[in-house]
Amino acid sequence: MKSAVIVFPGSNCDRDLAVALEQVTGRKPDMVWHRDTALPDRVDFVGLPGGFSYGDYLRSGAMAARSPIMRAVVDAAERGVPVIGVCNGFQVLTEAGLLPGALMRNAGLNFVCRPVALTVENSQSLFTAAYRSGEEIRVPVAHHDGNFQADETTLDRIEGEGRVAFRYAESVNGSARGIAGILNDAGNVLGMMPHPERAIEPAHGSSDGRRLFEGLLEAVA
């Protein structure tokens, strides 16, 4: 699998994501700078990492979503290339219009950094095929603006179309309906606040995130 990780000024999880992808796929991803205007040829997967792109000025992800490379990311997603946005990457995906809703300040107004329990809501997507529906996994979070919100009509549509990928087993940040990760309508774009790239091996405290990348690798291959 040929993958690419987008690097924005302020990214701090780009190397984490790159290491996870190399461990699972056996191939180093291309690190693509935000000012680039094209993705590598024949890329199979694109990852938008966590961090604080542009220092979270204006609002989280808003400036990164206007970076030159995002035009290429949007085009790739519309062609069916799998794209994942983790934490700040999820925020960027909503700001770029690839996913609905918005990520607001945590309900408790605190930065939350700890492992959390997630329930797998949809095991039929490219990203979740290696999990069982209803399975509980543990993946760390590290965010201040992870409170997913959308209007009730949008929430009903996401739920009805099976586009909730992961849900918090307990309230973490006040997200509407406990949503931790959602898919686009085509199923090839996933945004999630928890960090699967930080749950790759037992030394991390959990290897539950590894299966996300393993399932994706199998699906793409």
Image (cartoon, rainbow, N blue to C red):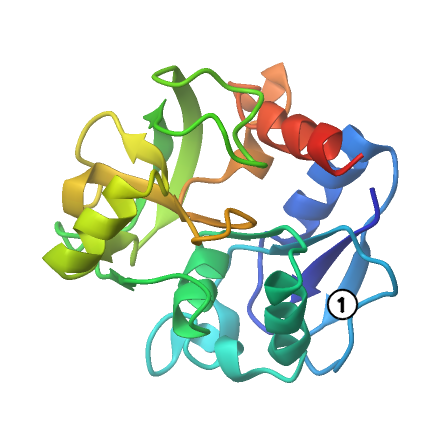
Q: Measuring 45% from the left and 59% from the top, which residue is drawn there? A: 88
Q: Is residue 196 above or below residue 48?
A: above
Q: On the picture, is 187 further left or further right than 107?
A: right
Q: Position of residue 151 (x, y in %)?
A: 14, 61
Q: Is residue 141 above or below residue 10?
A: above
Q: Position of residue 23 (x, y in %)?
A: 78, 31
Name the residue tied to disc 1.
32
Q: Secondary structure at mark 1?
A: strand
Q: Tell me which residue sits at (52%, 35%) in the image.
A: 125
Which picture quadrant has residue 154? bottom left
Decide if residue 197 is in sight here.
yes
The amino acid type, in three-letter code, at marker 1 is Val
User: Which image quarter is the C terminus in?
Assistant: top right
- Which residue sits at x=66%, y=63%? 79
In the image, 7 versus 68, the foreground residue is 68
Tell me where residue 21 sits by quadrant.
Answer: top right
